Protein backbone atom coordinates (compact mmCIF):
# COMPACT_ATOMS: atom_id res chain seq x y z
CA UNK A 1 0.00 0.00 0.00
CA UNK A 2 1.48 3.34 -0.94
CA UNK A 3 1.76 6.23 1.50
CA UNK A 4 -0.89 8.35 -0.21
CA UNK A 5 -3.47 5.55 -0.12
CA UNK A 6 -2.71 4.73 3.52
CA UNK A 7 -3.11 8.40 4.38
CA UNK A 8 -6.51 8.52 2.68
CA UNK A 9 -7.66 5.38 4.47
CA UNK A 10 -6.53 6.65 7.85
CA UNK A 11 -8.38 9.95 7.44
CA UNK A 12 -11.70 8.52 6.19
CA UNK A 13 -11.13 9.86 2.71
CA UNK A 14 -10.00 13.34 3.71
CA UNK A 15 -6.81 14.21 1.86
CA UNK A 16 -4.45 15.42 4.57
CA UNK A 17 -0.92 16.29 3.53
CA UNK A 18 -0.03 16.85 7.20
CA UNK A 19 -0.78 13.25 8.11
CA UNK A 20 1.03 12.02 5.01
CA UNK A 21 4.09 14.06 5.95
CA UNK A 22 3.88 12.72 9.51
CA UNK A 23 3.76 9.14 8.24
CA UNK A 24 6.86 9.69 6.11
CA UNK A 25 8.66 11.41 9.00
CA UNK A 26 7.77 8.48 11.27
CA UNK A 27 9.34 6.20 8.65
CA UNK A 28 12.57 8.21 8.92
CA UNK A 29 12.68 7.72 12.69
CA UNK A 30 11.80 4.03 12.27
CA UNK A 31 14.55 3.55 9.67
CA UNK A 32 17.14 5.14 11.98
CA UNK A 33 16.08 3.21 15.09
CA UNK A 34 15.99 -0.10 13.20
CA UNK A 35 19.42 0.66 11.69
CA UNK A 36 18.14 0.72 8.11
CA UNK A 37 20.61 3.45 7.28
CA UNK A 38 20.26 3.21 3.49
CA UNK A 39 16.50 3.82 3.76
CA UNK A 40 17.13 6.69 6.18
CA UNK A 41 19.48 8.31 3.65
CA UNK A 42 16.96 7.88 0.82
CA UNK A 43 14.23 9.50 2.93
CA UNK A 44 16.47 12.39 4.04
CA UNK A 45 17.69 13.04 0.49
CA UNK A 46 14.10 12.74 -0.75
CA UNK A 47 12.96 15.75 1.20
CA UNK A 48 11.61 14.30 4.44
CA UNK A 49 11.62 16.91 7.23
CA UNK A 50 14.93 16.25 8.97
CA UNK A 51 14.06 18.89 11.60
CA UNK A 52 10.94 17.04 12.75
CA UNK A 53 10.72 16.16 16.43
CA UNK A 54 9.14 13.47 18.53
CA UNK A 55 7.06 14.58 21.56
CA UNK A 56 10.27 14.25 23.61
CA UNK A 57 11.95 16.80 21.34
CA UNK A 58 14.26 14.21 19.78
CA UNK A 59 15.17 14.88 16.15
CA UNK A 60 16.24 12.32 13.53
CA UNK A 61 19.84 13.50 14.01
CA UNK A 62 19.65 12.85 17.76
CA UNK A 63 18.12 9.43 17.11
CA UNK A 64 20.97 8.61 14.72
CA UNK A 65 23.60 9.76 17.23
CA UNK A 66 21.87 7.70 19.92
CA UNK A 67 21.60 4.50 17.86
CA UNK A 68 23.86 1.83 19.34
CA UNK A 69 25.68 -0.07 16.61
CA UNK A 70 28.60 -2.40 16.16
CA UNK A 71 31.74 -1.45 14.26
CA UNK A 72 30.61 -2.95 10.95
CA UNK A 73 27.73 -0.43 10.74
CA UNK A 74 29.75 2.62 11.84
CA UNK A 75 30.52 3.86 8.33
CA UNK A 76 26.84 3.70 7.33
CA UNK A 77 25.81 5.48 10.51
CA UNK A 78 28.35 8.24 9.81
CA UNK A 79 26.97 8.58 6.27
CA UNK A 80 23.42 8.96 7.59
CA UNK A 81 24.48 11.60 10.10
CA UNK A 82 26.37 13.54 7.42
CA UNK A 83 23.37 13.20 5.09
CA UNK A 84 20.97 14.54 7.74
CA UNK A 85 23.26 17.52 8.35
CA UNK A 86 23.62 18.21 4.60
CA UNK A 87 19.84 18.18 4.31
CA UNK A 88 19.30 20.75 7.05
CA UNK A 89 19.38 18.93 10.39
CA UNK A 90 20.34 21.31 13.20
CA UNK A 91 23.49 20.11 14.99
CA UNK A 92 22.58 22.31 17.96
CA UNK A 93 18.90 21.38 18.28
CA UNK A 94 17.81 20.63 21.84
CA UNK A 95 15.36 18.01 23.07
CA UNK A 96 13.07 18.44 26.09
CA UNK A 97 16.06 17.74 28.38
CA UNK A 98 18.15 20.35 26.53
CA UNK A 99 20.42 17.64 25.14
CA UNK A 100 21.94 18.17 21.71
CA UNK A 101 23.05 15.59 19.14
CA UNK A 102 26.57 16.00 20.59
CA UNK A 103 25.28 14.98 24.04
CA UNK A 104 23.87 11.79 22.50
CA UNK A 105 27.08 11.07 20.58
CA UNK A 106 29.15 11.50 23.75
CA UNK A 107 26.80 9.24 25.73
CA UNK A 108 27.47 6.52 23.15
CA UNK A 109 31.17 7.32 23.04
CA UNK A 110 31.54 7.20 19.26
CA UNK A 111 34.52 9.40 18.41
CA UNK A 112 33.79 9.43 14.66
CA UNK A 113 30.28 10.81 15.23
CA UNK A 114 31.58 13.36 17.75
CA UNK A 115 34.09 14.59 15.15
CA UNK A 116 31.42 14.90 12.42
CA UNK A 117 29.23 16.97 14.72
CA UNK A 118 32.12 19.20 15.86
CA UNK A 119 33.23 19.76 12.25
CA UNK A 120 29.70 20.92 11.48
CA UNK A 121 29.54 23.47 14.28
CA UNK A 122 28.13 21.53 17.22
CA UNK A 123 28.31 23.56 20.44
CA UNK A 124 30.69 21.74 22.78
CA UNK A 125 29.55 23.90 25.67
CA UNK A 126 25.79 23.38 25.38
CA UNK A 127 24.39 22.63 28.83
CA UNK A 128 21.59 20.11 29.34
CA UNK A 129 18.87 20.09 32.01
CA UNK A 130 21.35 18.49 34.46
CA UNK A 131 23.87 21.28 33.90
CA UNK A 132 26.23 19.00 31.97
CA UNK A 133 28.16 19.69 28.78
CA UNK A 134 28.54 16.84 26.25
CA UNK A 135 32.11 16.04 27.35
CA UNK A 136 30.82 15.09 30.81
CA UNK A 137 28.99 12.11 29.31
CA UNK A 138 32.02 11.14 27.25
CA UNK A 139 34.22 11.19 30.38
CA UNK A 140 31.57 9.30 32.37
CA UNK A 141 31.33 6.65 29.64
CA UNK A 142 35.14 6.35 29.56
CA UNK A 143 35.33 5.86 33.32
CA UNK A 144 32.54 3.26 33.32
CA UNK A 145 34.41 1.28 30.67
CA UNK A 146 37.63 1.50 32.70
CA UNK A 147 35.75 0.28 35.80
CA UNK A 148 34.38 -2.68 33.83
CA UNK A 149 37.92 -3.48 32.73
CA UNK A 150 39.17 -3.34 36.32
CA UNK A 151 36.40 -5.57 37.62
CA UNK A 152 36.99 -8.34 35.11
CA UNK A 153 37.78 -11.66 36.78
CA UNK A 154 41.45 -11.64 35.72
CA UNK A 155 41.96 -8.17 37.21
CA UNK A 156 40.79 -9.02 40.73
CA UNK A 157 44.23 -10.23 41.83
CA UNK A 158 45.79 -6.88 40.91
CA UNK A 159 43.12 -4.93 42.79
CA UNK A 160 43.65 -6.99 45.96
CA UNK A 161 47.43 -6.49 46.08
CA UNK A 162 48.84 -4.92 49.28
CA UNK A 163 49.52 -1.17 49.32
CA UNK A 164 46.59 -0.36 47.05
CA UNK A 165 45.00 2.97 47.92
CA UNK A 166 41.42 3.02 49.10
CA UNK A 167 39.13 5.27 47.12
CA UNK A 168 36.73 7.48 49.03
Image: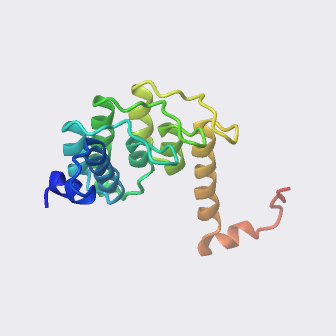
Labels in figure, total: 0
Farthest residue toward the front?
A: 13
The way the protein has been coloured in the rendering is: rainbow
Q: Nearer the viewer, residue 57 or 8?
A: 8
Q: Is residue 79 left or right of residue 107?
A: left
Q: Quadrant of the C terminus?
A: bottom right
Q: Which residue: 47% across, 28% down?
A: 122
Q: Nearer the viewer, residue 57 or 3?
A: 3
Q: Which residue: 26% across, 51% down?
A: 37
Q: Nearer the viewer, residue 1 or 91?
A: 1
Q: Is residue 166 left or right of residue 130?
A: right
Q: Quadrant of the N terminus?
A: bottom left
Quadrant assignment, res 147: bottom right
Q: Is residue 77 left or right of residue 134?
A: left
Farthest residue toward the bottom?
A: 153
Residue 62 at x, y = what percent?
Answer: 44, 43
Residue 39 at x, y = what percent?
Answer: 21, 51
Residue 86 at x, y = what percent?
Answer: 28, 29
Q: Which residue: 38% across, 33% down?
A: 116
**Relative height, residue 107 to residue 144 (above, below):** above
Q: Nearer the viewer, residue 129 or 125?
A: 129
Q: Which residue: 41% across, 53% down?
A: 67
Residue 20 at x, y = what percent?
Answer: 25, 47
Quadrant assignment, res 164: bottom right
Amino acid sequence: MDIKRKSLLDTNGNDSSFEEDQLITDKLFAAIVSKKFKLARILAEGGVDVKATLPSGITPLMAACDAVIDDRHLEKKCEVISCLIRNGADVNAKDNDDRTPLHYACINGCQDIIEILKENGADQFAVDINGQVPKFYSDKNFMQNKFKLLTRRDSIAVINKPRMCDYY
